[in-house]
Amino acid sequence: MASRSPSEAGTRARPTERRVRLAKVALFAACCVPLALLVAAGLTDELGANPVETITHETGEWALRLLLLTLALTPLRKLTGAATLIRFRRMLGLYAFFYVCLHLLTYVWLDAFFSLAYIWDDIVKRLYITAGFAGFCVMVPLAVTSTNAMIRRLGAKTWQRLHRLAYAAALAGVLHFLWLAKADLREPLIYLSIFAVLMLARLPPISRKLGRRTRPRPAASTS
Ligand code: HEM
C-alpha cells in the first residue's frame, strides 16, 4: 500500500484541527448557558421564592456535573478511540472550577454575609459544608496548575499525579450533596453511582479492556 506524503497528511489533519477548534468554541458557549439562564431568571424575577437557594443549587449542581464530565473523558476516549476528546478536558475542568467559585461566592456573600466566624462555624459543625470546603480546597491547585507552562514546570509525571486530586474533589462534591440532602437521596445517589462507575473504569484490568476495544491512535495534547 502506498504511504501518504507529508503534504497529503497535512491537508487531512487541517480539517480535523478546525473541527476541534469549532467544537471548543461550541463547548465554551454551551458551558456559559447555565450561568446565562440564571442571570436571565434573576433579571426577570424568576428565581423562585428563595433566589439565594436557587443560585446555590444551580451553581453547585453544574460544578458537580462538569467535574464528573471532566472525569468521564478518559474512559470515553478509551471506549471510543477518539483521542481528541482529551483536548476538551481542561476547559471542562476549568468551567467546573468557575461554577464552584460562583457557588462559594453565593454562600460567602448572600448566605454568610462575609462573616468569617459564621463560615468557620459552618465548616466545623456541618459535615456537608466540611466536605464542600475540602472539595473546593482540592480544586484550587488543579485550576492553578492547568496551564501548559505549569505542566512543563512540574513535569508530566508530577502533574499527572497532582491531577489525580480531581477524584478527591469529585468524591467530596458527591458526599457534600449526599450529606446535605435531607429526605430525597435519589439525585445525590445518581451522582454517586456515576462517580463509582468512573472510578471502576480506571481500575487497571477494566481500563486495559476498554483500551483494547479500540485501535490505538496518536496521543493528543492535554489542552
Ligand atoms: C466551601 C465550599 C462549599 C460551600 C460552602 C458549599 C455550600 C453549599 C450550600 C449552603 C448548599 C445548599 C444546602 C441546602 O440546600 O441546604 C450547597 C449545595 C450544593 N453544593 Fe455546595 N458548597 C461548597 C462546595 C461545593 C463543591 C466543591 C461542589 C461540587 C463540586 C458542590 C456542589 C453542591 C451541590 C451539587 C449542591 C446541591 C444542589 C441541589 O440541591 O440541587 N458544593 N452547597
Image (spheres, helix red, strand yellow):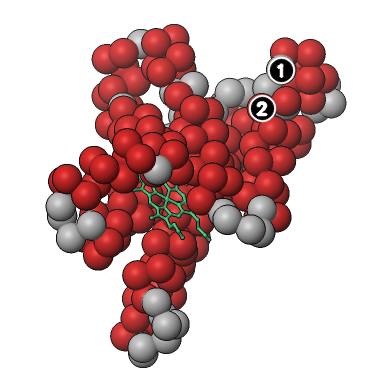
Residue at image coords 40%, 43%: 126
The one nearer the camera, 45 or 205, is 45
Classify 197 as above or below 57.
above
Q: Quadrant of residue 36?
A: bottom left
Compared across the picture, whether 108 is left or right of 132 comes to left
CA–CA distance in space, label 2 to label 1: 7 Å
Residue at image coords 54%, 33%: 171
For the N terminus, the quadrant is top right
Q: Which residue is mark 1?
A: 203
- Amino acid under label 1? Leu
Mark 2 secondary-structure assignment: helix
Query: Pointers 2 and 1 in contact (CB under 8 A)?
Result: yes
Classify 66 as above or below 148.
below
Mark 1 secondary-structure assignment: loop
**Residue 192 spot, x, y in % from top left:** 65, 41
Which numbered marker is on residue 199?
2
- Amino acid under label 2? Met
Classify 171 as above or below 58.
above
The one nearer the camera, 75 or 178, is 178
Q: Quadrant of residue 208?
A: top right
**Residue 200 spot, x, y in % from top left:** 73, 25
